[in-house]
Image (tube, grey):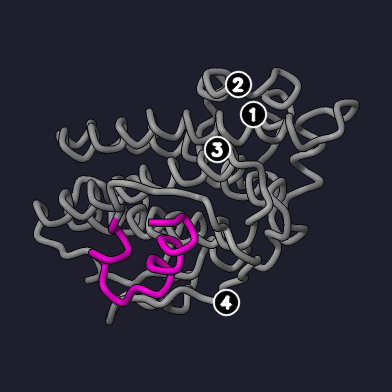
Amino acid sequence: MEFRDWAIHILSADRLEDKLFCPEVLTDFSPGPALLWKEPTRPPGMGFEKHTRRDKLPPVSEMNNPDKRAVCLHRFGGHELLAVEIMAYALLAFPDAPANFRKGVAHTLKEEQKHVRWYQKRLEEMGVQFGDLPLYRHFWAYVPHLTTPLKYISTLSLTFEMANLDFAPFYARVFAEQGDTLSSELMKQIFEDEIGHVSFGCRWLKNFKDPQEPDWKTWKNSIPSILAPSRARGPEFFADHRRLAGVDEEWVNYLSTLV
């Protein structure tokens, strides 16, 4: 199956199993013209709901309640599904991007599909079906601003996925403190993959940017103006996790100052 056909299949799917479908053989011989997908089709009951202040994640103080942990996992699974859809969008929006860039996006998309399945399985073990709780537009709201591959990686790989270098280990610890080993191990697995995803973004940012400009400045200038740079970090800041992904010291230092 061609990348283009696969991406269209994902974005037009009204069943979760179709959004998570990955053919054994993928090719990219015919990227076709750029196609800007307005909004993904969603399975019944999994459409974007309006997010309000009341819909914040439960505080850490409530994580002793398994229902509250399930709310967190469901939200995180929703983020992974959004990542699947945004990566499919990128395959359609940037047909002229370098072949290796497109292959990297496709590889990362497969891993995001795997993450959705992991969350789905863990939620079922906790008595919750993925889609039982509200799902939100979140990251998709920034899609209209992803007009170049550089803006795409700066926003998705180097902001939202980079933040997961903090969020994933943070919640792994929180869940472990409540004796929820399975949820904790899931977050650790997610974290390991996110290192590679951020590394992909770092490598391509260096390829796309002006060599005279610092990495962090190119990134900051490439994210949407409505997106705060602080979204690239979590409640605790793990500098070493970024170094593992290839983020340079100047960038790490800049991020450490953000609140």
Crowding at mark 4 (Cα within 10 Å: few <14, some 14-19, many 20+)? few
The structure residue drawn at horizontal position 25% and vertical position 37%, both measured from the top left corner, is 186
Q: Which residue is mark 1?
A: 203
Residue under circle 2? 246
Magenta segment boundaries in residue numbering:
1-21
Q: Position of residue 105 (x, y in %)?
A: 51, 45
Relative depth, front residue between 238 and 186: 186
Please say if the residues under marks 1 and 2 sit with CB atoms less than 8 Å apart: yes
Query: Rounded to the nearest whole Å, what is the CA distance between mark 1 and mark 3?
Result: 14 Å
Q: Could you tell me how far apart the alpha carbons at marks 4 and 2 are, in whole angstroms?
A: 33 Å
Using the rendered view, name the quadrant where residue 220 is placed: top right
Whole-angstrom CA distance, mark 1 to mark 2, is: 8 Å
**Mark earlier in primary sequence (2, 3):** 3
Q: Disc 4 vs disc 2: which is toward the camera?
A: 4
Comparing labels 4 and 3, the label whose residue is closer to the camera: 4
Task: Say whether residue 58 is left or right of residue 207.
Answer: left
Secondary structure beneath dot 1 equals: helix
Q: CA distance from mark 2 to mark 3?
A: 11 Å
Mark 3 belongs to which amino acid?
Answer: Met
Task: Judge left or right: residue 72 versus residue 208.
Answer: left
Mark 1 touches mark 4? (CB < 8 Å) = no
Residue drawn 69% across and 37% down? 258
Q: Return the mark for residue 38.
A: 4
Q: Amino acid at mark 1?
A: Arg
- Residue 78 falls in which quadrant of the image? bottom left
Q: In this figure, which residue is indicated by the disc labeled 3?
A: 162
